[in-house]
Amino acid sequence: MEDYVILAAAAFVAGMIDAVVGGGGLIQLPALFSTLPNVAPATLLGTSKLAGVWGTGAAALGFARRVRVQWSTAVPAAVAAFALSFAGAYTVTHIPPDFIRKLLPFILVAVAAYTFAKKDFGSIHAPLHIGGKERAWAILVGGGIGFYDGFFGPGTGSFLVFLFVRFFGFDFLGASAVAKVVNVACNIAALLWFGYSGHLLWQLGALMAVCNVLGSLVGIRLALRHGSGFVRKLFLVVVTGLILKTGYDAFIVG
């Protein structure tokens, strides 16, 4: 019973952070791995996805009701992400992601440094692309991140936010809204994979899903109340956490 309380609380906090800038896995996955050390890693990953897809879906709907979502970017990016997530999951069964694991902390440092140095980065919503060019960029970004999510995964939501600000000209709030739609597609693809292979704890996943959704609703309110400036600051905090976590995993643990 105590384990379920801990995991429910972790799912709530993860949903709140994930709704704003992504990175909820920083909290949810370590909680699962430390609380249930004897359960197969794939089953814990699948259970986390089961919870996360509901929280991310709730965040996507919440943003769609209150923020103008750039659907002309979100839809092609989501479709590409869904398709390429399967390709990434298939690839990881044949090629270990060791190189990406060691490279990731340095990529995240570059993302954090760029965001910190440009004080006005993501403060103004001024889309850069329209028509075919917008769709092409959306497919490229969605497909690339979808593949990464299926192949490795940490920081997917935060990478999406950064890329939509940097290459599409969105502000942080608009980028976060579009990122949620794409992230839902990634999570559904991964969940289908884990469900097919039987790696799910349904009861625990359902409990965590409820808490994840509740956390997402709180996160949406915070993001909408405080705007892009708040999202930018939380983004930097989450990316810093990702740098520490991925660096520790890559160079200290193994």
Image (tube, rainbow, N blue to C red):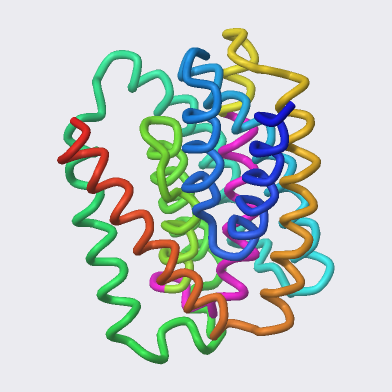
Residue occupying the point 18% across, 30% down: 254
Q: Is residue 184 left or right of residue 22?
A: right
Based on the picture, tell me whether residue 174 belongs to the magenta stretch.
yes
Nearest the eye: 171 or 71 = 171
Residue 22 locus on image (x, y percent): 54, 56
Q: Is residue 25 left or right of residue 107?
A: right
- Let me know if residue 180 appears in the view: yes
Q: Residue 241 falls in which quadrant of the image? A: bottom left
Residue 1 locus on image (x, y percent): 74, 26
Residue 68 locus on image (x, y percent): 73, 74
Q: Looking at the picture, does residue 42 appear above or below residue 99?
A: above
Q: Is residue 171 left or right of residue 253?
A: right
View extreme (front): residue: 2
Residue 95 locus on image (x, y percent): 24, 19
Based on the picture, tell me whether residue 127 belongs to the magenta stretch.
no
Nearest the eye: 37 or 21 = 37
Residue occupying the point 21% across, 39% down: 250
Q: Looking at the picture, does residue 181 appear above or below residue 235?
A: above
Chain part drawn in magenta: 166-189
Q: Is residue 239 left or right of residue 23?
A: left
Residue occupying the point 18% across, 46% down: 103
- Let me know if residue 75 appears in the view: no
Residue occupying the point 54% across, 72% down: 130
User: Magenta region, mostly helix, strand or loop?
Assistant: helix
View extreme (right): residue: 65
Q: Looking at the picture, does residue 12 appear above or below residue 151?
A: below
Give the total of numbered labels.
Answer: 0
